[in-house]
Image (cartoon, rainbow, N blue to C red):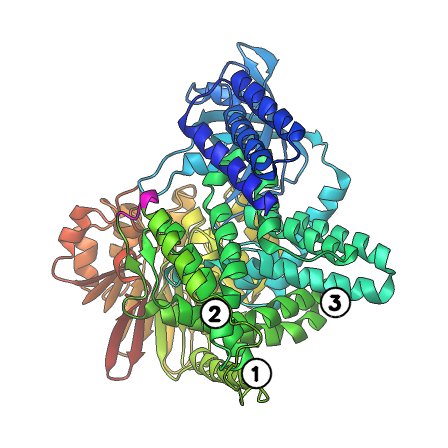
Amino acid sequence: MTAIVLGSAWLIGIYLGSLVSLTPEASVISGSMAGLVAILVRREPALRLGLFCVAALLIGSVRYQLAIPTVDDAALQYYNGQGTVQVRGVVNSDPELRDKRLSVVVEAEQASIDGQWRDLKGSMLVYLPRLSHLAYGDTLELTGRLESPPVFDDFDYRGYLARQGIHSTMAYPRVRVLGNQGVAPLSWIYAFRKRLSQALDTALTEPQASLAKGILLGIRTSMPQPLLDAFSRTNTTHILAISGWNISLVVSFLCLVGGKLLGRRQMLAFAVGGILLYTTLIGPQPSVVRAAIMGTLLVAASYLGRPSDAIAWLAIAATGMTALNPLLLWDVGFQLSFVATAGLALLAPTFQSRLSFLPTWLNESLSATFAAQLATVPVLASTFGQFSPVTFVANLLVMPAMLPIMLLSALASVVGLIWTPLGYLPASLDWLFLSYMIGVVEYTASLPLASIAIAGFSFVLFVPYYAALAFLFLALRPLPISAPRPQNLTRAVPFGRVILVLALLVALAWATVFTMPRDELRISFIDVDQGDAILIETPSRQRILVDGGPGASAVMSYVGRRVPYWDRSIDLVALTHANEDHLAGLVEVLERMEVRQVLEPGLPSNSLTYRRWLELIRVKNIRTTKARAGQEVDLGQGIKLQVLHPSPQTVRDIETDLNANSVVLRLVAGATSLLLTGDANETAQRELLGSGQELASTILKVPHHGSRDGLIDSFLTAVDPRAAVISVGKNNTFRHPAPETLAKLKDVRVYRTDENGSVEVTVRSEGYTVETER
């Protein structure tokens, strides 16, 4: 109880420190005096505890004020917005590979000011091309513009980074690697984490691989945004955050192994060391650190034979973490982790006693779900402005799959490091559980009223809400042991296992149905944000992918859902041109799938992405054809893919203009045809008009995302489409599609990926149909 009271006083002191500016000297002196008097007052426990609380409160307020950085010319953030600067520093953590870029945290050491290198302090977040080769411990010299992190309408990104000690950003600077001074054990751990992640990428298709990495390794950066949105709408994002559940499983495994192989004393060191290693492996997020501290206390209490007190341990963890970083008190991850854990500790036993008539598996699942969700409602509502009525059902259905997913993902990744084919055995089972979880989350997220907007839920409402929850806790506190309980005749039957097995069989059946090829031609314009990616699936079981978009997650997730788990082949990958918004996603396709042939312009480019593209083609020995007008690919059953552009003459004349040399393809299936134009500009369109080739097509993929000069009138007249598709990103900075282009298409049925999501065209003998994602 003492730890809880003192911890609460400490946290209140930190919060008051953000509201009231007290001089650190006065607060320290007052707090020290209160603590000294408390030590002397031994015969009055209540007074003694009260004085210690005053001391904790005052020192907590001082700790907050000391955490606010001083901004002077020795601070890195002082130079934000002051033009181009040179900074030297060290990469202080594992670089984060995101969908479209590499994010690196650099601890600055020096900056060139007026031509002289001066020492300074501060951390910055640096954005670099996705394929940049950097590692923890690298010493860098960066030349670029320092900027303050932005504050968005719906998210305080500046505050989010400030809580991590980051007050500056630098986008795509010039980089020079000076050396490496990383701590060797950390370098080994980060390298091992990367290899585990790559093993899961190899063993699983998308989006299952990304979900497995999130659950096992805490890596969420490769997950497609629509899937993340589904988890958010159902309030199941806690599944993707390493927390107490994951740590408890690790603790159980370590204690089991340590107990079998080592003595009692050695088991304690083994378990604590394992917790520290796993925490370092997945990264010190607030929920992870909280769970690691409580897991360590649990092991220590078990070793010492002391009773466990989850709330006291929670208070100790909160005090220790905020002592190191007081700003964590405003971190939503920190808040959710502690509130949910408190709810589980206090409310779950109450619900379990009242639901004892249910089967044990259902009782425990329902109780944990109700406890955690009821405890976190105010935090979720005030932070995200939403409440999910389906969250109870979604959590109840997906949580039983968590244990097999974590175990099978760990087994697949570790075994895959030893021998890749062996990793496919546990991965095939893992894929089934992962597919089940994805299906449940996406289905419940699609239900009406899956998420209800809650406006104006302020901090003021926290007090009455938690007061009502406390009343519920007292009113429904666990029944005494002597009280009669309803007889549970169903516990002998493993209903939980039966239901989970049946659900998995249903998931397998549906997954098989959806991934099996169909006897019809399907063309999917994939929503990849601001870029192009088109998947063609033919009745003769051939797959053609035209472009891959600006990042890997969208195209890999879409293709992964459309191909059977056991067949990861693409018959032809066509690159229209080497711009990032068409090429970047294809690099991962080449890395992770079996590509039989590549069709591309064959024009030079110095980008990192294109160099990696060529390297993969060479290493994997993929047959490559330079696309030139007049070529034709027979796709069977009368379906043909014609290459209309570029012509050999165009390539010779304007080799450096990628858009003018963009590959243009025409897919012909009976009376239906589609013209896939890439980013063909006015020069390319006029070249096509003068080529004498057949341009008339049923559906037009509008060139260059519908830009203002992307579609000339005479070209549109020659194509004369009945429908048009514009592949474009929502709220893109280019303001595509342009009003002028949309005006030209006023008599054509237009589909846009920013509004309609992915667009699927199905061609049959009697014509075609169009279905959209939304």
**Secondary structure found at label 1:** helix
Q: Tell me the amino acid under the disc marked 3.
A: Trp
Q: Are marks 3 and 1 in contact (CB under 8 Å)?
A: no
Q: Tell me the amino acid under the disc marked 2.
A: Phe
Q: Mark 1 = which residue?
A: 497
Residue at figure coordinates x 56%, y 10% from the top left:
115
- Residue 5 in percent (x, y) is at 55, 42
| Image quarter of residue 536 | bottom left
Q: Is residue 738 above or below residue 429?
A: above
Task: Single out the residue that lies furthest toward the front.
Answer: 43
269 relative to 154 in the view: left or right: right
Taking depth in this image into account, of 639 and 471 the one nearest to the observer is 471
Q: Determine crowd level at label 3: few under 14, some 14-19, many 20+ residues with C-alpha closer than 10 A.
A: few
- Residue 395 in percent (x, y) is at 46, 68
| Image quarter of residue 426 | bottom right
**Of pointers 2 and 3, the one earlier in the residue sequence:** 2
Q: Determine crowd level at label 2: few under 14, some 14-19, many 20+ residues with C-alpha closer than 10 A.
A: many
- Residue 492 visible in the snapshot: yes
**What is the spatial separation of the Cα atoms under label 2 and label 1, in whole angstroms?**
22 Å
Marker disc for residue 351:
2
**Of pointers 2 and 1, the one earlier in the residue sequence:** 2
- Residue 24 in percent (x, y) is at 53, 19
**Of pointers 3 and 1, the one earlier in the residue sequence:** 3
Residues shaded magenta: 456-460
Q: Mark 3 = which residue?
A: 419
**What is the spatial separation of the Cα atoms under label 3 and label 1, in whole angstroms?**
31 Å
Q: Tell me the amino acid under the disc marked 1.
A: Arg
677 relative to 246 in the view: left or right: left
Which is closer to the viewer, label 2 or label 1?
A: 2
Taking depth in this image into account, of 162 and 376 the one nearest to the observer is 376
